[in-house]
Amino acid sequence: MATRKPSYSSSVFVNCPFDEEYKPILHAIIFCVYDCGFAVRIALETVGGDNRLDRLISCIEESRYSIHDLSRIESPRLNMAFECGLFLGAKRFGNHKQNTKDLLILDAVDHRYKQTMSDVAGQDGKIHHNKPNEAIACVRSFLYRKSKRASIPGAAKINERYNQFLSELPKMAEVARVTTDELTSFDYLLDLVELMRTWIERTS
């Protein structure tokens, strides 16, 4: 999401709901990804130009890892399931580079994702119970196990750092000449991510 695109091996495509209720979980996941040394790719990173599907395909193609939160799957809201299928298709039918893809499936209720998408029942899904701190624990565990990076901090430490970031956010917003209300809107998601990224770089 920075100006320069991150490498394939450090990119994590985040496929999640874009609604008010989900925002605390989304923000926690994004912070966790960056604090683990990776970079987020998400459909909202660009506007205009290519249509949404083309942007999604680009994000998927350019990301080795992905996180798919299926906690909002309900008819007719099936975007998350569709994007998960796109990622699995790229992994299955793509070239050798695409074959290295790996994904994490999230839900809020245990075993529900196996009912809504029975074909992915063999995937190692994790449950966050709609709690940001549990979402951080799920994402940290996935990135640590899949990437084998020894430098990734534990979930408790990431949660501690995230809470510290949130406590400093009003002052950072003031310096950046934006309001905290603006930073919690989807229109300012990129601004929030940039503040996260620079804070993590400064405090690591």
Image (cartoon, rainbow, N blue to C red):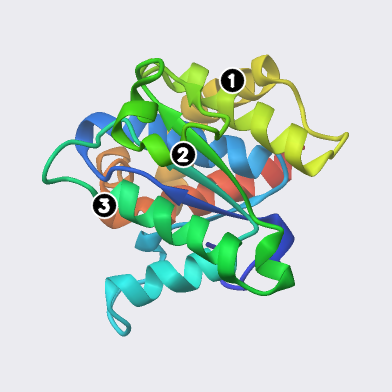
Q: Which residue is found at the position 34% from the left and 22% from the top? A: 112
Distance CA(mark 2)–CA(mark 1): 29 Å
**In front: 162, or 100?**
100
Q: Is residue 24 above or below residue 78?
A: above
Q: How many marks?
A: 3
**Where is mark 3, residue-wise?**
79
Q: Which residue is mark 1?
A: 159
Circles 2 and 1: CB atoms closer than 8 Å: no
Residue furthest toward the bottom? 49
Between residue 66 and residue 20, name the one nearer to us: 66
Check whether the beta carbons of the residues at disc 1 and disc 3 lie within 8 A of each other.
no
Name the outermost residue toward the right: 150
Check the picture and name the quadrant holding the C terminus.
top right
Which of the two labelled residues, at mark 2 and mark 1, occupies the earlier sequence position?
Answer: 2
Q: Is residue 29 above or below residue 96?
A: above
Secondary structure beneath label 1: helix
Q: Residue at x 31, y 30 (%)?
A: 71
Q: Which mark is residue 18?
A: none
**Which residue lies at the image location 72% right of the left edge and 69% below the top edge?**
97
Closer to viewer: mark 2 or mark 1: 2
- Give the camera-side residue of 169 and 76: 76
**Three-letter amino acid code at disc 3?**
Asn
Q: Quadrant of residue 53?
A: bottom left
Residue 178 seen from this side: no
User: Does residue 15 sit above or below 31 in this rendering?
Assistant: below
Q: Please state which of the two labelled residues, at mark 3 or mark 2, is closer to the viewer.
A: 2
The residue that disc 2 covers is: 120
Q: Residue 41: horizontal and vertical position, in percent? A: 51, 58
Residue 76 visible here: yes
Q: Nearer the viewer, mark 1 or mark 3?
A: 3
Residue that extends furthest to the left in the rendered view of this protein: 76
**Can you give x and y, in whole percent of width and height, for residue 152 in the image?**
78, 33
